[in-house]
Amino acid sequence: PFASVELSFGADLHREPVEALLAATSGLSPETAVVLETIASEAGIRHLLRAEQAALDSICGQLRVLIPSTRIEPLKVEPAHGWRMGARLAWSGRHVLLRTDGAGEAAAGLLAALGPLARDEAVLVHLALRPGRPRPLPEPRRRDERTTLSLFAAGSHVEAHQLPAIRAKYATPVLHTEIVLAVACGHAGRGAHLLGRVSAVVRSRRGARGQLLVRRMNAHALQRTMFRRPRRGVLLSPAELVAAVARNEIPVVALLERRRAVGVLETVAAYGGHA
């Protein structure tokens, strides 16, 4: 069974230590699963970390070294949100290449997508990670050498000019990544809107390979997915993860935790240093 803690970040939450934390996570045993959850509601934003106790102790130890201002507290009460609907996010193809630049823009975009929310609304970003290994690379083919079968094998072939970027990615730690979104709201139309806001931010991280796939889920499928052991998902590097789901929300997260009901414009202004 998973143990859970709640995290509160300080002003030293930046991209480099977050990438180092994810790289350390990739060094755990292959069957280890780690879940990071960001829950937004009218009251603010909460961050939860879930894993088996041994893995949780290891990650918390890394957190204390890499991001010393982080407060780590046992989770006493589970969030009581009735998740109405959700979506699973994934990328097509075997060798995905996402953008690693503009992580600050992605962080600001995600913060804007997570608010403002009404009293009975909440949004969850559920990120499940497992240590991964690079996939074998096929031999590149020129356009005039492709067969009809290879064209149907989506994502299996690699263009020669893409090989250096994929090899550079596979030279770094990689993690099997599963991203699930969930919303609590009054009606389905509002839920679709909230899911679309967050999905649009993640979609903007598309790089040279891989198209974002969004699979909608009802409440039953959502609960089944969130309570089962995470499966192996798309392989992402720490740099891709930080840029894709804004795990480096920088000092504005601490600002959000101190201020209730922060509006979107105020959030973006604070991120830019003008609040």
Image (cartoon, helix red, strand yellow):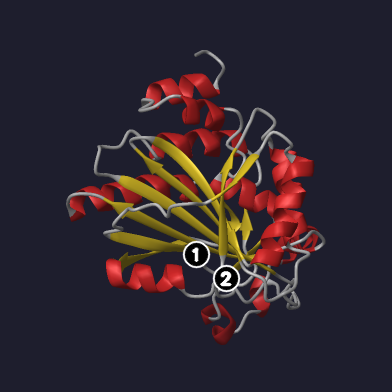
Q: Position of residue 257 (x, y in %)?
A: 49, 31
The disc labelled 2 sits on which kind of residue? Answer: Gly
Q: Position of residue 72 (x, y in %)?
A: 63, 44
Residue depicted at 59% across the width and 82% down the height: 150
Residue that label 2 marks: 233
Residue depicted at 55% across the width and 62% down the height: 210
Crowding at dot 1, Cα within 10 Å, few <14 / some 14-19 / many 20+, comes out as some
Quadrant in which residue 248 is drawn: top right
Residue sitting nearer the eye, 260 or 239: 260
Secondary structure, mark 2, is loop
Q: Are marks 2 and 1 in contact (CB under 8 Å)?
A: yes
Query: Marks 2 and 1, Cα distance to the nearest angstrom?
Result: 8 Å
Looking at the rendered image, the quarter that the N terminus falls into is bottom right
The disc labelled 1 sits on which kind of residue? Answer: Ala
Quadrant in which residue 113 is drawn: top left
Above-or-below relation of 187 to 33: above
Q: Position of residue 180 (x, y in %)?
A: 44, 61
Name the outermost residue toward the right. Answer: 171
Residue that label 1 marks: 90
